[in-house]
Amino acid sequence: MSWRVRVVHTTGYRYEAPVMQSYNEARLTPRSDRRQNLVAGRVETTPATRSYRYTDYWGTEVTSFDLHAPHTELKIVSSSVVETGPTVMPHNGITWRDLRGGEVVDRYAELLESTRYVPRDRELASIARDLRKGRNPTEAVLAISEWVHDQLTYTRGTTGVHSSAVDAWRAREGVCQDYAHLTLAMLRAIGIPGRYVSGYLHTKANAKVGETVRGESHAWIEAWTGGWWGFDPTNDIEIGPRHIWVALGRDYADVSPLKGTYSGGQASAIEVSVNVTRLA
């Protein structure tokens, strides 16, 4: 089953004093891949800016823009139409011995290493090894994802944008970013390459065609067990038509939707919204 959806992601900032110049990067354009096709996409700003697009190291489309005129507000609107497909089923043919082979370790070294968001932790590694027992790599991914889903309580405000997987584990609470980081920490601890995926989630499984809902910026994981496939540990569900994939990387730092620098007064967000409409 496939869906066609429209996503409108709006972010607005207000500055305490006029900003004279700013440089920004937006990772807001959905990808085209084996289960998703980008039909149309654009990123617009108010005030209008000069922009150009490039593809980053991880294959994410980046819209870079700069503004060299005084302004006290900045609004970024990303609009896209995407066709999403059914779940890509996990690969079951690879063994633990295959994962330990030099070719796999060398090829996916960056996705096996620890990062600031996905640090090494002895307790988590021990739990991951226990969950691995008696399971093949694909089954271990599902078991760890389910375990993370069961261990954490979805709570806003306990963790922040800079919180690591260990922070979320200690708090036993977090949001989708934390569920993804914790899952990745455990997968990498047992030698399964894992990457962080950011995107959007249509929040209504039985949405009617033409119905607009308040969507969510979302995060999930992809694991390599002979091929890449995804799972959503926050909701304990497979990746399906309601997931719209935007960016991927080692962790949140590689996929931040908006980042940049500016000179001027302190900024505060005045508008952040995601509206998703099922078109077909």
Image: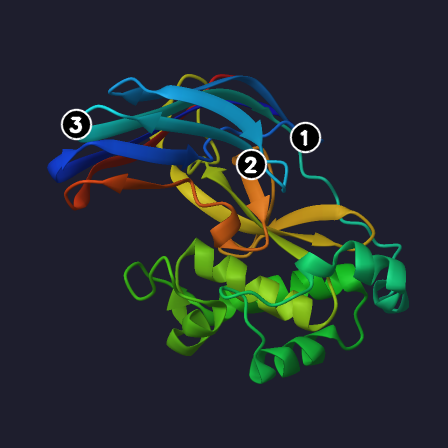
Place of residue 122 in the rendered image (x, y in percent of width and height, measured from the top left): 59, 84
Check the picture and name the quadrant holding the N terminus. top right
**How is the protein colored in the picture?**
rainbow
Residue 152 lies, with reference to residue 229, above or below; the image says: below
Q: Secondary structure at mark 2?
A: strand
Of marks 2 and 3, the one in the foreground: 3
Residue type, mark 2 in image: Trp
Callout 1: few (<14), some (14-19), or many (20+) C-alpha neighbours within 10 Å?
Answer: few
Residue 158 falls left or right of residue 247: left
Nearer to the camera, 71 or 154: 71
Q: Which mark is residue 71?
A: 3
Residue named by callout 1: 33
- The tally of labels here is 3
Q: Earlier in the sequence, mark 2 or mark 3?
A: 3
Q: In the rendered structure, find residue 225 and report the number of the disc placed on it.
A: none
Residue 245 badge:
2
Front label number (1 vs 3): 3
| Residue drawn at the location 25% of the way across and 21% of the way down | 46
